[in-house]
Image (spheres, rainbow, N blue to C red):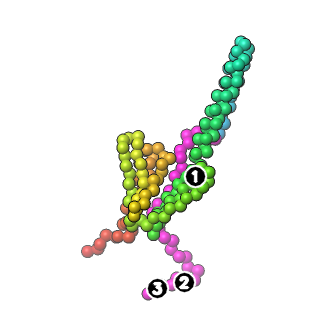
Amino acid sequence: MTSLAAPGAPTPSPPVFLDAVLTPHRSLSRRGFATMMAALGAISFVAGTVFWLIGAWPVVGFFGLDIALIWLAFRLSYRSARQTERVRLVEDELTVERVGVRGDRRFWRFQPYWLRVVFEEVDEERNRLYIASHGRSLVLAAFLGPGERRIFADRLSAAMSSWRSYWSPPAEE
């Protein structure tokens, strides 16, 4: 028999066991980047002026080039920080949404009952996390550091355990 809720009554939302958004870590904020570039520019300007005054004017161009290369390296680093992964485990599915550096989106859906969380650890600095089900596998958190990946693997395993407990409550005697 189906129970009908009264009109206007709130419907219970399905439980969410895990909802994690993973992003690459960047230790320098945009404001810190601007401050660092201003300091490096000032140092290069002073050093370039000194070299100009002693007659070594060709060196001045290299001071500008090194600042440009540092700026480019940081811009590429910040660009790679735009990628994200959202891992969400709800009552009937585990979904992974991956947004790439160019904004392209990919989406995977898994049935949690058959899902295995696999964490392979070679040594302290090399590990890999992936989920597998029915011959399909998907690498997760590849852009995170080994320690962060290990922590997320523990969180994902704990969420899967909670999900399994939700569907298989302990038998009462």
Q: SS of the residue at dot 1?
A: loop
Crowd rating for badge 3 (residues with CA inside 10 Å; few <14, some 14–19, many 20+)? few
Residue drawn at x 35%, y 70% is: 168
Residue drawn at x 37%, y 61% is: 161
Measured from the top left, where is residue 67 in percent x and y? 66, 30
Measured from the top left, where is residue 100 in percent x and y? 57, 52
Kindly identify which numbered label has been placed on residue 100.
1
Kindly identify which numbered label has been placed on residue 131.
none
Residue stretch in magenta? 1-30
Residue drawn at x 26%, y 74% is: 173
53 vs 131, left or right, is right
Under mark 3, the amino acid is Thr
In the image, residue 119 sits, relative to residue 18, either above or below, namely: above
- Which of the two marks, 3 or 1, is nearer to us in this view? 1
In the image, residue 6 sits, relative to residue 37, either above or below, namely: below
122 vs 72, left or right, is left
The residue to which callout 2 is attached is 6
The residue to which callout 3 is attached is 2
In the image, residue 168 sits, relative to residue 154, either above or below, namely: below
Q: Nearer the viewer, residue 37 or 118?
A: 118
Under mark 1, the amino acid is Gly
Q: Is residue 158 visible?
A: no
Q: Main SS of the magenta segment?
A: loop
Whether the magenta-drawn stretch holds residue 16 is answered as yes
Q: Mark 1 or mark 2: name the one nearer the start of the chain.
A: 2
Measured from the top left, where is residue 79 in percent x and y? 61, 45
Whether the magenta-drawn stretch holds residue 85 is answered as no
